[in-house]
Image: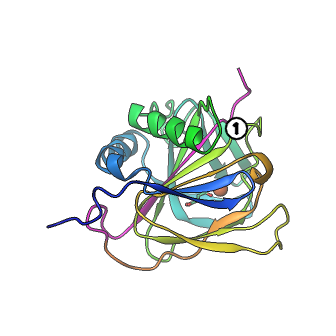
Amino acid sequence: MLDLFADEAPWQEPLAAGAVILRRQALSQSSELLAAIEQVAALSPFRQMVTPGGYTMSVSMTNCGPLGWSTDRHGYCYTARDPLTGKSWPSMPDVFRRLALEAATLAGYADFSPDACLINRYLPGAKLSLHQDKDEATLSAPIVSVSLGLPAVFQFGGLKRNDPLQRVLLEHGDVVVWGGESRLFYHGIQPLKPGHHPQVGSLRYNLTFRHAGNQE
Ligand code: SIN
Ligand code: FE2
């Protein structure tokens, strides 16, 4: 098939103070990223976690890197071990680390060294309610978020839950970086619409890179 977009260079769209969308930034690495997700998931499988409120999340999650985020009836936290397997989370694939550093640098955050990557898997209907990423020990590092597969509507608000929301469609290969003034802005994902992506199938993956532990 003739791919008219294969050679299209990535472009940037400002989102908010300290936040930018790097459109298609991950596109040229998407096959490697997808293969790496499968390798991680073979060691630490995707699972639907339960929140402290007793709600089973519609998104399935796993992690890679020194630290991984999870939630259960007792609360949210970053741990060095996968509570499901009892082993360390799988190491962060080089292709992940390189992309996260490249994207952070393009967004104006030099020297980003993520120690955690949360991998979300959305099937049609799955959503992520409005929340802040605030479980990280230091907030000086940005969040780098990579979208693969089916498009999803990303909501991006402000510091207060009821601040007005921007709604942007995130597509295969898009990367969002938020930090600085917008580091604690509320965000979420609207229920995924059914569809088929030629490379990924009937689902969406999202990688979020964070610096979660204490700054070295
Ligand atoms: C997240 O907030 O952890 C994920 C956002 C997304 O799936 O794009
Ligand atoms: Fe988040």
The quadrant of the rendered image in which ligand 2 is seen is bottom right
* Bounds of the magenta segment: 197-216
Residue 54 visible: no
Q: Is residue 5 magenta?
A: no
203 up-or-down from 175: above or below: below
Counting from the top left corner in percent of width and height, residue 200 is at 31, 62
At x 56%, y 33%, the residue is 81
Q: Is residue 142 left or right of residue 168?
A: right
Residue position marked by numbered label 1 in the rendering: 141
SS category of the residue bearing label 1 = loop
Q: Is residue 200 magenta?
A: yes
At x 53%, y 35%, the residue is 101
Amino acid found under the numbered disc labelled 1: Ala
Q: Nearer the viewer, residue 24 or 141?
A: 24
Q: Main structural element of the magenta stretch: helix, strand or loop?
A: loop
Q: Nearer the viewer, residue 91 or 21?
A: 21
Q: How is the image coloured?
A: rainbow
